[in-house]
Amino acid sequence: MMPATALAPWLAQQSRQLLAQRGHAWLLQGPSGLGQYSLGLALVRTWLCEHPTEQGACGSCPSCHAIEVRTHADLCVLMPETVMLELGWPLDEKSQSDIDDKKRKPSKEIRIEAMRDAIEFAQRTSARGRGKAVLVYPAERMNHVTANALLKTLEEPPGDVRFVLASEAAHQLLPTIRSRCLAHVMTWPQETEALHWLQGQGVAAADAPTLLRAAGGRPEDALLFAASGRDPKSWRGLPRALKRGELAVVADWSPVQLIDALHKLCHDLMALGMGAAPRYFDVADLPPPPPIGTLSAWQRDLGQERRSAEHPYNTGLMIEALVSRTQTALN
């Protein structure tokens, strides 16, 4: 985990803005890749920090260290188990044991058992005397049962507990959850700011503009693309390669990655066909757009394929079928 001073510039600015305001529950909302998790973690770090400033947490006190090593007694993180494992947060002993013993797979939703533990946590006295904090991410992974369990505590919290709900799909949250939080819409960074940040994360200067465009201007999604092992240089040639039906260019992609790319290609061809500017590809890299009816049918087909993309019957056959249908649509 990065110290507060390492926040991306557009996130540091938002952190200062939010810390200057009062409120027991924040809802950080916006599309993926804008830093909701990083901003939420920065807020709870500062709330629990022993020497906070207007800029954020000090990064060196025992409280900041406890968060860095994922052992802070006054911080509860509510996440799907898959996300906790990905971000390095420890699971409770029973859940870890069940997963280790192959009794079940890590949950992709926030489990009701975890929510009950969080509600019990909110009732306890602060261990370090600076209050308590609950970080929920991605908040849209609460199902209706889990979300309803949170409602009363969110509406009438004990005096020293504060909440951050970070969401990449806030429209999926219950209206009653949204109404109990102060909403903050994530700020989009300027292109030059995002490119500079990507280069600071180790992305080659030549690749950063292509990756940022492929991510629709969302820098954290661009960084995930860079870390995926896919060649960013192939992105520009992808539309015409798919028009020729070249399977090799995506043979090592997952179905989820390919369907995401095809949705972006379909979006840009629709935009181009209606006289608008594409978002994910350069105009020069796109083939002539097919009729809007063809694109609409292809978009619906991709939406259906997305439902089974994470658990395909046969990954290779699914990739081959997706490329074949794309070639048909583009020609």
Image: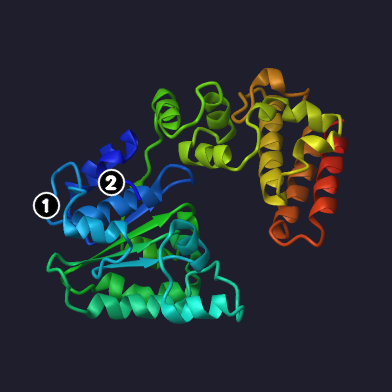
- Which residue sits furthest top? 284
Residue 237 sits above or below residue 3 on the image: above
- Callout 1–callout 2 Cβ contact below 8 Å: no
Question: Quadrant location of the C terminus?
Answer: top right
Instruction: Report whether 162 appears left or right of 30.
Output: left
Q: CA distance from mark 1 to mark 2?
A: 14 Å
Residue 178 badge? none
Q: Position of residue 90 (x, y in %)?
A: 41, 68
The front one of 322 and 254 is: 254
Q: How is the image coloured?
A: rainbow
Residue at 32 percent of width and 78 percent of height = 119
Judging by the rendered image, the residue that carries numbered circle 2 is 3
Q: Secondary structure at mark 1?
A: loop
Residue 39 sits above or below residue 138 on the image: above
The mark that comes first in sequence, 1 or 2, is 2
Q: Image quadrant of residue 91?
A: bottom left
Judging by the rendered image, the residue that carries numbered circle 1 is 51
Q: Position of residue 108 (x, y in %)?
A: 55, 66
The front one of 36 and 51 is: 51
Q: Is residue 145 visible?
A: no
Q: Image quadrant of residue 225?
A: top right
**Disc 1 marks which amino acid?**
His
Q: Secondary structure at mark 2?
A: loop
Residue at 17 percent of width and 73 percent of height = 127
Q: Residues within 10 Å of mark 2 (few under 14, many from 20)?
A: some
Q: Position of residue 330 (x, y in %)?
A: 83, 32
Q: Position of residue 210 (x, y in %)?
A: 58, 26
Residue at 42 percent of width and 30 percent of height = 194
Instruction: Report whether 69 appears left or right of 309.
Output: left
Instruction: Report whether 159 appears left or right of 282.
Output: left
